[in-house]
Amino acid sequence: MTTTANSLREIHSLHQRSKAIRDRLLSVPKTIVARQAQVARKQDTLDKAKKDIQQIKVSKGLKEVQRKSLLGKIDDYSSKLLTVKKNEEYKAIQNEIALVKSQVNKVDDEIIDFEIDLEDRDASVKLLEADLKKAQDDLATYQKQSTEAKAGEEAKLEELAHSLLNAEAVINPDIREQYQRVIRQRGAEAMAVVESGACMGCNMSVTSQMLNDLINCDTLVFCRSCGRILYMAEEMEKMTKRIV
Ligand SMILES: [Zn+2]
């Protein structure tokens, strides 16, 4: 049996399809690791945002304690006012009360600022939580789908390997070993189509002798530049047959 351009083309296509499936299968664990890292980063961001909220709540709590003690002072001064006889003393206490009241106002403003800040932060924590959940769900879906697809992809690979064995049987036994050696070394990259008189693996022109060899199909024709096994494009093969 002689190697026909048709069979080499088919063989190359089978190698390319096998490679695409193998690449896809290999990419799954990498994608999972990358997505797990992404989920971990989102979790860290959320944890930090929650921790910040806790700290702000502590600061707000301290302000509330301070407010209570200032109000206590006002109460004390107010009861003192009831017992004071001298006008001067009365005025002095009233001034003290006014001073403490202004301190209370300041603390009230600070507490309101904390409350506004906390509301904003609670809203952003909700967004971070939703974002994290989506990333976790997406990861789980991807893991489930890739696990489900794996068996099918592996079956397809086996099918392709079987088709390859059949297709390779067409290769002349004299040159089969040479073919297998190049395939072992370079896989799907070991072959290239010739289009417009050039190897499509490296764009180097092929000689007329090589074109003749390609038409005769008795030997494997290697690109002199990149070393790929060459075969004719379908269109070119039709043309040469017409000429013959
Ligand atoms: Zn080449």
Image (spheres, helix red, strand yellow):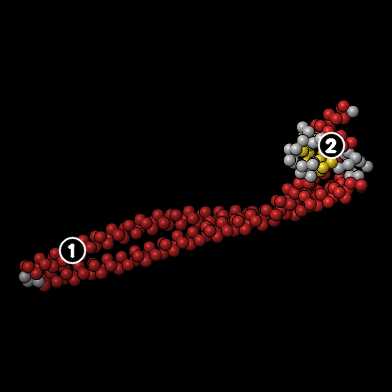
The quadrant the C terminus occupies is: top right
Three-letter code for the amino acid on which mark 1 is drawn: Leu
The quadrant the N terminus occupies is: top right
Mark 2 residue crowding within 10 angstroms, few (<14) / some (14–19) / many (20+): some
* Place of residue 222 in the rendered image (x, y in percent of width and height, measured from the top left): 82, 42
Q: Is residue 80 left or right of residue 235?
A: left
Instruction: Name the front one of labels 1 and 2.
Output: 2
Residue at 77% across / 50% down in the picture? 186
Q: Is residue 69 left or right of residue 216?
A: left
Residue at 75% across / 38% down in the picture? 204
Whether residue 165 appears in this view of the structure is: no
Q: What's the CA distance linking mark 1 and mark 2?
A: 102 Å
The answer to whether 38 is drawn above or below residue 225 in the figure is: below
> Which residue is situated farthest in the top direction here?
243
- Secondary structure under badge 2? helix
Look at mark 2 in the image and give the residue it sits on. 210
